[in-house]
Amino acid sequence: GNSVTQMEGPVTLSEEAFLTINCTYTATGYPSLFWYVQYPGEGLQLLLKATKADDKGSNKGFEATYRKETTSFHLEKGSVQVSDSAVYFCALIWAGSYQLTFGKGTKLSVIP
Amino acid sequence: ETGVTQTPRHLVMGMTNKKSLKCEQHLGHNAMYWYKQSAKKPLELMFVYNFKEQTENNSVPSRFSPECPNSSHLFLHLHTLQPEDSALYLCASSRQAHDEQFFGPGTRLTVL
């Protein structure tokens, strides 16, 4: 079946450090891929998405590229801020499906 | 109001109580969802409604009863819950299947 694997957290970085959160998926075919972010005490917010191979999603300085050959969708940001502290979820969905499959989430803490 | 709203934000109930969670979306979407988010577990999809019709029920116990009177409103009726049902309950909506889902802030439920 489908599954999404994220790197184990928590991740602690200093402000302005480079961020990578790894995400790989197991699926046959080409699902749409998403990154969601959950700030403390809030629901999930869509951060970025990619719907086909080689697409690059980007938002608020974050980027992720849909890599078909490695079945990956790693999240990156060149310079993190304290306000980026949150839990990040990688997810996939199939065309015609309502079922979002989520990874377990990676908690990021950015310290000044 | 914009986006997806949920009430109440916090709820404490005993195992013999009956309560309801409410979700409203102001995005003109056709599909609505209930998710359960427990500590250290991936998000679990509970129910999906599309154009007010239930399309998915992921083996959810009958003590959880959803209701979707129209495409903008979704309820989750709760009765005789167990302490292990304590979690964050998230509502989401999307325009159609496989589109990005927009989440509400959640209801933090504690069952005593």
Image (cartoon, rainbow, N blue to C red):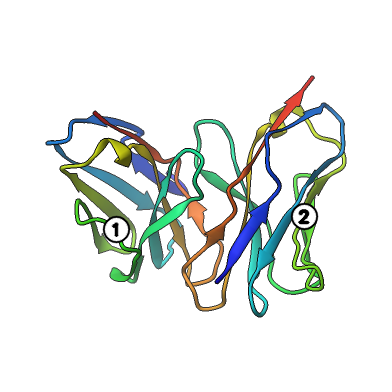
**What residue would you read off at disc 2?**
A74
| Spatial CA span between label 1 and label 2 | 32 Å
At label 2, counting other C-alpha atoms closer than 10 Å, the crowd grade (few under 14, some 14-19, many 20 or more) is some
Disc 1 sits on a residue from what chain? B
Q: Which mark is residue A88?
A: none
Answer with the quarter of the image where residue A61 lies: top right
| Residue A32, x across and y down, in percent | 64, 69
Mark 1: amino acid: Val
Q: Is residue B45 left or right of residue A28?
A: left
Chain on which label 2 sits: A
A109 or B31, nearer to the observer: A109
- What residue is shown at x 68% (from left), y 38% (from top)? A9
Q: Are marks 1 and 2 in contact (CB under 8 Å)?
A: no
Could you say whether the residue bearing mark 1 is in a helix, strand or loop?
loop
Left or right side of B34 for A102:
right
Q: Is residue A33 above or below residue A74?
A: below
* Whether labels 1 and 2 share one chain: no
Identify which residue is drawn at 52% across, 63% down.
A100
Q: Which residue is mark 1?
A: B60
B79 relative to B27, above or below = above
* Residue that sits furthest to the left in the current view: B16
Q: Nearer the viewer, residue B110 or B30?
A: B110
x, y (%) of residue A1? 55, 72
Q: Position of residue A45 (x, y in %)?
A: 57, 47
- Percent coordinates x, y for residue B67 in the rendering: 23, 58
Q: Is residue A17 left or right of residue B70?
A: right
In which quadrant is the N terminus of chain B drawn?
top left
- Residue B47 seen from this side: yes
* Residue that appears at 78% across and 68% down: A55
Residue A92 seen in render: no
